[in-house]
Amino acid sequence: MRIARPGLVLVFALALVGCSRTVPAQDVETQVRGAAADAGFEVDAVRCPDALPAKVDARVVCTFTETNGTQHPVDVTAVSVADGSVRFNVVEQTTAPIGPGTQ
């Protein structure tokens, strides 16, 4: 069953890689993919244009695309940084999804 709703909110923790003090875009994409799949979306692709800086309130906007072509922009925001981990929220933007699966 596919659960389609704006305001999808999930929280994740990711270990920092080395001393870079960022979460690589590829790692953020992996977490967004998992969050969307756990919410019932059939995810085809995820795109995050930038790494997420390891500081509270840092933000990057990513987009996941369902297998039917519908795109969902999500805000990824760091909420805490401690002991080599970044905890962040993934929140679906409240604008309507874009693409063939929308009405």
Image (cartoon, rainbow, N blue to C red):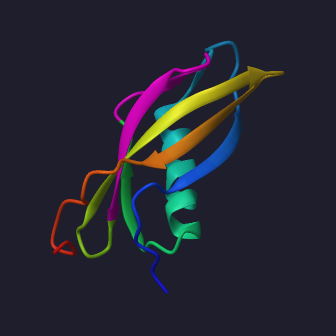
Q: Left or right? Give the position of 100 relative to 64.
A: left
- The residue drawn where x is 67% and y is 44% is 12
User: Relative to residue 62, is residue 35 depicted above or below?
Assistant: below
- Quarter the C terminus occupies: bottom left
Q: Left or right? Give the position of 30 relative to 66.
A: right
> Residue 82: x, y in percent?
79, 21
Give the extent of the magenta segment. Answer: 49-65
Taking the view exactly as shown, the residue that stands out farthest to the bottom is: 1
Taking the view exactly as shown, the residue that stands out farthest to the right is: 83
User: Looking at the rendering, which quadrant does residue 80 occupy?
Assistant: top right
User: Looking at the rendering, which quadrant does residue 65 occupy?
Assistant: bottom left
- The residue drawn where x is 71% and y is 39% is 13
> Residue 27: x, y in percent?
56, 40
Residue 40 located within the stretch drawn in magenta: no
> Residue 100: x, y in percent?
15, 73
- The residue drawn where x is 49% and y is 57% is 8
User: Relative to residue 57, is residue 94 depicted above or below?
Assistant: below
